[in-house]
Image (cartoon, rainbow, N blue to C red):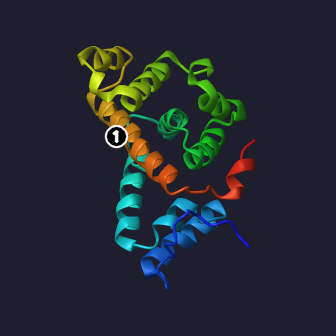
Amino acid sequence: MSTPVTALDLPPVSPLPEQTQKYFDICNEKLGMVPNVLTAHAFDIDKLNAFTGLYNNLMLADSGLTKLEREMIAVVVSSINKCFYCLTAHGAAVRQLSGDPKLGEMLIMNYRVADVTPKQRAMLDFAEKITIASHKIEDNDRKILRDHGFSDRDIWDIANVAAFFNMSNRVASAVDMRPNDEYHAQFR
């Protein structure tokens, strides 16, 4: 018997709408699986579409941040929040995009020991502050990012990626969302 995706009894809509099934088929083709976070949302197609729309916009659309940097933010935020699902899934993405299996582990354990650029370190410090004490962010925090070469649009993207994962981490933890087993061994 397979492990449930969450601790809740919310089975996916059956059959899935054609567009959703097409999306899941693309995931299977490209990733070799449908990420459990998508399966978890599939009980309500409107919620699934809202989640995937925002995720795809933040993580895959054009940005001054690289895909790796956005994944690094996801891992650092998820590490602070101790989100098992996101640490597993996005740790694998960091390993894949960086080609460095140690980087994902360092970001999970303590991002301060990771071999990142000073610019990336400033970005991760900002993401940490958003996660721990967003109400304490001041002009100087944004100035530090600008001094490292981030544009105001980049700062917007850093804030939105960090905020998205703070929300996602809380949902995943609250419903005991489980990552696909495949993530654990990927890109090591």
Q: In the rendered view, tell whether residue 40 sits above or below residue 181.
A: below
Between 11 and 95, the residue placed more toward the observer is: 11
Between 73 and 137, the residue placed more toward the observer is: 137
Q: In the rendered view, tell whether residue 49 sits above or below residue 92.
A: below
Residue at 41% over, 53% down: 55
Q: Secondary structure at mark 1?
A: helix
Residue at 44% over, 52% down: 171
Instruction: Report x, y in % for residue 8.
Output: 51, 66
Residue ID for mark 1 = 160
* Image quarter in which the C terminus is found: top right
How many callouts does the rendering have?
1
Q: Residues within 10 Å of mark 1 (few under 14, many from 20)?
A: some
Residue type indicated by callout 1? Asn
Corner quadrant of residue 44 = bottom left
Instruction: Report x, y in % for residue 125.
Output: 44, 22
Instruction: Report x, y in % for residue 6.
Output: 56, 62
Horizontal arrangement in the rendering, residue 113 relative to residue 9 (left or right): right
Horizontal arrangement in the rendering, residue 1 relative to residue 42 (left or right): right
Residue found at the far left of this picture: 139
Residue at 75% over, 49% down: 185
Instruction: Report x, y in % for residue 126.
Output: 39, 24
Between 126 and 176, the residue placed more toward the observer is: 176
* Image quarter in which the N terminus is found: bottom right
